[in-house]
Amino acid sequence: MRRMVQETRLSPADFIYPVFVTHAQEGPIKGMPGIFRYTVEGALEAAREAEEAGVSGILLFGIPEFKDATGTPALSASGVIPKTLQALKNAGVRLVLMTDVCICSYTSHGHCGVIQDGRVSNDDTLPILAEMARIHADSGADVVAPSAMMDHQVSAIRNGLDSAGHQDVSILSYSVKYASAFYGPFRDAAGGAPQFGDRKTHQMDPCNTQEALQEVALDIKEGADMIMVKPALAYLDVIRQIRNRWPQMPLMAYNVSGEYAMLKAAASQGYVDESAATLEVLTGIRRAGAQTMITYHALEAARWLNHSIL
Ligand code: PBG
């Protein structure tokens, strides 16, 4: 009877699986058991597994062969992300193919934008993000997801996509992205930790919710098709407020690397029951108002749901 009257249900289609792709051989990631840096072939295999488990999409992150001050390798049509997209399309993978659009893993200094006089230059970064998104779209991306938190990145990308004939490619904006301590394992994985300073000039202050609403309003106006809150767990109230204010917008939450690491660490020590705790967390994010979750738990959680362990 509890099952019959459940208000919130999880299904594998609620999950998007983040996948790291690199040129070199894949390896484990500190703090993230079960997650790897894949080669193009490995990423294809991971995508197949996600498809089989019923996950709805994958979000690709590239780790280039070399980095420079302006993130040039992000604009290579033969870079790791274009190659992976082409491989996934050619293989007929039936997943929504999404790509992260930010240059922090492509720049030698690890910042999300180009540096001018020791600062991240918002406006000089916009054309780079637009070009990166256009290259992803050319290679088969269905959705591009700008995560650099530059002002006007959504309109710059939308204009770039439209003028290249990519009207059908959607934008998932990381509209509400906090300057969070929970990105640690990801920065290790992508080699994208800032070499000096931090991201507080453009990522949001965890104290603010009004600002979050303003970020969403601006992104919707600029043409975002879907919006995201990131991280998820410390921001469930923000998710709920956005859901109430824009019930018509697809709203996603990024259950980030540090959140995954926390749960994995506790489970490995036997402090919590892993599947029950993970599904409880994911249910909580969904109950708060996110309809889709980007989560490193995607494969496991989808399999648990398929075998209906609840
Ligand atoms: C790139 C980006 C980051 C994450 C997603 N895209 C790192 C950051 O902003 O420092 C973090 C994802 C995670 O922790 O799982 N800007």
Image (cartoon, helix red, strand yellow):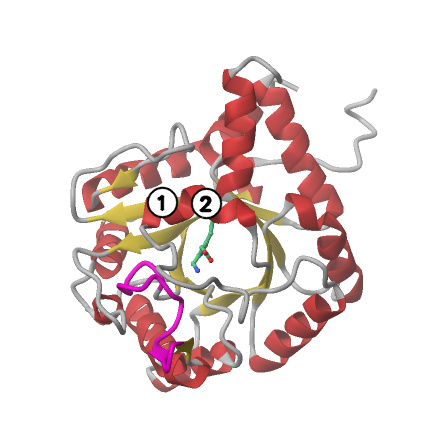
Does the magenta stretch mainly form a helix, a strand or a loop?
loop
**Can residue 167 be seen in this snapshot?**
yes
The residue that appears at 28% across and 41% down in the rendered structure is 37
The residue that appears at 39% across and 49% down in the rendered structure is 187
Ligand 1 resides in the quarter of the picture at bottom left
Cβ atoms under marks 1 and 2 closer than 8 Å: yes
From which residue to which does the magenta span run? 104-118
Residue 184, disc? 2
Query: Which amino acid type is shown beneath numbered disc 1?
Result: Asp
The residue that appears at 83% across and 29% down in the rendered structure is 5
Q: Which residue is mark 1?
A: 188
- Give the image location of residue 121, x and y in percent: 42, 81
Query: Which amino acid type is shown beneath numbered disc 2?
Result: Gly
Please say if 104 is above or below 57: below
Which part of the image, by quadrant, shows the N terminus? top right
The residue that appears at 21% across and 43% down in the rendered structure is 39
238 vs 193, left or right, is right
Q: Residue furthest top?
A: 270
Residue 158, disc? none
In the image, the residue with mark 2 has its CB under 8 Å from the nearest atom of ligand 1: yes
Please say if 235 is above or below 29: below
Q: Is residue 107 on the magenta stretch?
A: yes
- Give the image location of residue 260, x and y in percent: 52, 35
Question: Callout 2: 10 Å neighbours few (<14), some, many (20+)?
Answer: some
188 vs 151, left or right, is left
Q: Is residue 243 on the magenta stretch?
A: no
Determine the CA span between mark 1 and mark 2: 7 Å
* Nearest the eye: 188 or 307: 188
Please say if 214 is above or below 42: below
